[in-house]
Image: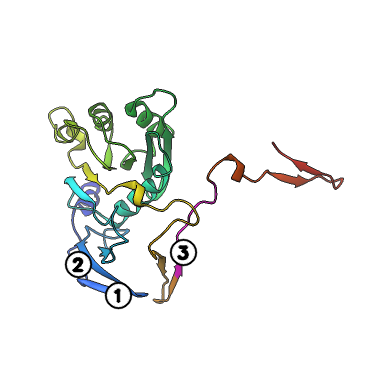
Amino acid sequence: MAEKMSKMYFTASGKKFPEGFEVLGTSYEKVEDLRYGTNPNQGAAFYRPKSEKLGSVIGSMQILKSGKGGLSQTNLEDIHHALGIVKYFERPACAVMKHLNPSGAAAQFENESQHEVYKKARDCDSRAAFGSVVAFNTAVTVATAEEIMSTMVEGVVAPAYEDGALAVFEDFDRFRRNKHIRAMQCGPLSKLPKFEGDDTGGALEIKVLGDGTLVAAEPFLSKVRGETDLLPATATNKEGAEIVCK
């Protein structure tokens, strides 16, 4: 039974989707039919917009090392959410994403190496990090790649990889358990909008409800650019006095 369940997650659904479509004035073209959707019994496909302003980060992503029969919907959503964390940092940062939730994230403190930053992010919850997708905002180093391969990771995404790092992901003599890991190179994170007022190129977040109806919303962009943008926490006690936390 366990072997049958495992095979389900390695096998593509085989379901085909249209080559393109248009929604709310934006035309989309198919990148590929995915391994499966949220679950192995669900078909899914990955599309990118034809617009020059959109799709330059995840839509242009290259799979440098593949495995496990291609990407799933959850893999792509994990990539999206993980890059949505590390894009805010100028210094080296890492986010470890498991089924759309960050099990850990970390940024460089003082002169820490990327390898040390990754270990901090992973060890926030090392158990939840099993089978995760890991994102970086800087080029993955050889030392970081070796640390990644020491545990079970589904995929790694970064804007670049240092010489020798990709070879580590192929070194199955040393790292047998992780032979299905994927290494992906995304576009420059500077093209992702971060703060309110940034140019989104007209991108919308779209949810399809159970009966086929749609909800379209503006993407979340932070108001907080620094400490001065943080609102103080306040409360009123039982005597009616206002308490302001500093």
Amino acid residing under circle 2:
Lys
- Residue 218 numbered mark, or none: 3
204 left or right of 6? right
Can you tell which of label 1 and label 2 is closer to the viewer? 1
- Residue 15 numbered mark, or none: 2
Number of other residues with Cα within 10 Å of mark 1, as a class: few under 14, some 14 to 19, many 20 or more: few
Tag 3 secondary structure:
loop
Q: Nearer the viewer, residue 166 or 194?
A: 194
The extreme right residue here reads: 239
Number of other residues with Cα within 10 Å of mark 2, as a class: few under 14, some 14 to 19, many 20 or more: some
Residues at marks 2 and 3, CA–CA distance in whole angstroms: 30 Å
Number of other residues with Cα within 10 Å of mark 3, as a class: few under 14, some 14 to 19, many 20 or more: few
- Based on the picture, tell me whether residue 217 belongs to the magenta stretch: yes
- Residue 22 numbered mark, or none: 1
Relative vertical location of residue 185 with respect to residue 30 in this rendering, above or below: above
Q: Residue shown at 32%/61% (left/top)?
A: 53
Magenta-highlighted stretch: main secondary structure? loop
Tell me the magenta residue range.
216-224
Looking at the image, how many numbered discs can be counted on the residues? 3
Amino acid residing under circle 1:
Glu
Q: How is the image coloured?
A: rainbow
234 left or right of 157? right
